[in-house]
């Protein structure tokens, strides 16, 4: 089974900061990595699919990059409404979720 | 707008069956694939299975002997049944729609918390 290691688990940043969250796969997952955002009490929301494709309606400050085993979600300029938990999902072979990153404002 | 809403009992006794409903509005379940995912206390998440637009199913091998996903197209609902539950099945259960670009989940329900306890 493919394991996903997500880091950091917790992140504190200021409005306007550039924020990066990482996911590392235990083996090659090609491009099949998504990023999701979940705010407290809300449904998860798809941000990025297949490494770097922005889902409909998602602000352009969100971007994804990577390939093979190492992937990154970047928020170019953190906004207050971005406070949430972010998690990755690989769907190259089965499905494996990252453990999540809780993002808070400093 | 596509919306999904999970419903079902919040408490199930060990050895009994867990049954949940996902009600979909704004889109027909006779298109796309529809899945169940759960999040355990401690935040680990697990894909459970899906039902396709034609009614075919696929399940997580770790659950295969206990899980069934069915649907009622007349009500635009799909269902999860998990048999012989234990306390390890305590989780928040989500239903979700597979998007048009493969195996990503583009719409999710808010989730329903299910506790397995006597």
Image (spheres, rainbow, N blue to C red):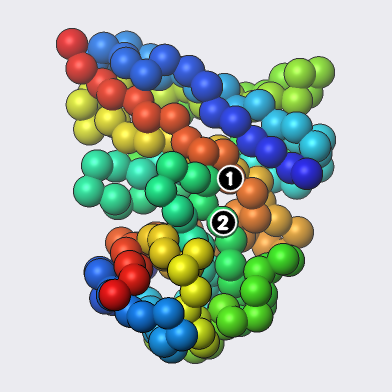
Q: Kindly identify the residue that appears in the image at 47 percent across and 36 percent down.
A: B111
Location of mark 2 (residue)? A45
Whether residue A28 is visible, yes or no, is no
- Pointer 1 chain: B
State the count of labels.
2
- Residue B94 is labelled as none
> In which quarter of the view is residue A103 placed?
bottom left
Q: A58 or A70, which lies in front? A: A58
Above or below: residue A26 compared with residue B94:
below
Residue A79 in the image: state x and y as whole percent: 49, 74
> In which quarter of the view is residue B52 placed?
top right
> In which quarter of the view is residue A4 placed?
bottom left
Q: Kindly identify the residue that appears in the image at 69 percent across and 38 percent down.
A: B3
- Residue B108 is labelled as 1
Residue B24 in the image: state x and y as whole percent: 70, 31
Q: Kindly identify the residue that appears in the image at 75 percent across and 25 percent down.
A: B76
- Disc 1 element: strand
Q: Kindly identify the residue that appears in the image at 64 percent across and 41 percent down.
A: B34
Location of the C terminus of chain A (image quadrant): bottom left
Drawn side of residue A83 relative to residue B103, left or right:
left
Q: A80 or A86, which lies in front? A: A80
Whether marks 2 and 1 lie on the same chain: no
- Disc 2 element: strand
For marks 2 and 1, give the CA distance: 7 Å
Badge 2: how crowded within 10 Å, few (<14), some, or many (20+)? some
Residue A59 in the image: state x and y as whole percent: 65, 74
Whether residue B108 is visible, yes or no, is yes
- Pointer 2 chain: A
Drawn side of residue A36 relative to residue B29, left or right:
left
Q: A46 or A41, which lies in front? A: A41
Location of the N terminus of chain A (image quadrant): bottom left
Check if mark 2's residue and mark 1's residue have beta carbons within 8 Å. Answer: yes
């Amino acid at each position: 089974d493919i394991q996903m290691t997500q880091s950091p688990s917790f992140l504190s940043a200021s409005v306007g900061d550039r924020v990066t969250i990482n996911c590392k796969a235990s083996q090659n997952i090609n491009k099949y990595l998504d990023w999701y955002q979940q705010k407290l009490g809300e449904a998860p929301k798809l941000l990025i699919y297949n490494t770097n494709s922005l889902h409909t309606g998602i602000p352009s400050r969100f971007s994804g990059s990577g390939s093979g085993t190492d992937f990154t979600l970047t928020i170019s300029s953190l906004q207050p409404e971005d406070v949430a938990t972010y998690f990755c999902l690989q769907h190259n072979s089965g499905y494996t979720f990252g453990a999540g990153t809780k993002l808070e404002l400093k | 707008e596509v919306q999904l809403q999970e419903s079902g009992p919040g408490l199930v006794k060990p050895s009994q069956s867990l049954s949940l409903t996902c009600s979909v509005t704004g889109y027909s379940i006779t298109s796309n694939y529809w899945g169940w995912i759960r999040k355990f206390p401690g935040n680990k998440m697990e894909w459970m299975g899906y039902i396709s637009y034609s009614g075919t199913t696929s399940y997580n091998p770790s659950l295969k002997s206990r899980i069934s996903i069915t649907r009622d197209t007349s009500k635009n609902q799909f269902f999860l049944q998990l048999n012989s539950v234990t306390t390890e099945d305590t989780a928040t259960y989500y239903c979700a729609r597979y998007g048009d670009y493969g195996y990503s989940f583009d719409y999710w329900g808010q989730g329903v918390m299910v506790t397995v306890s006597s």
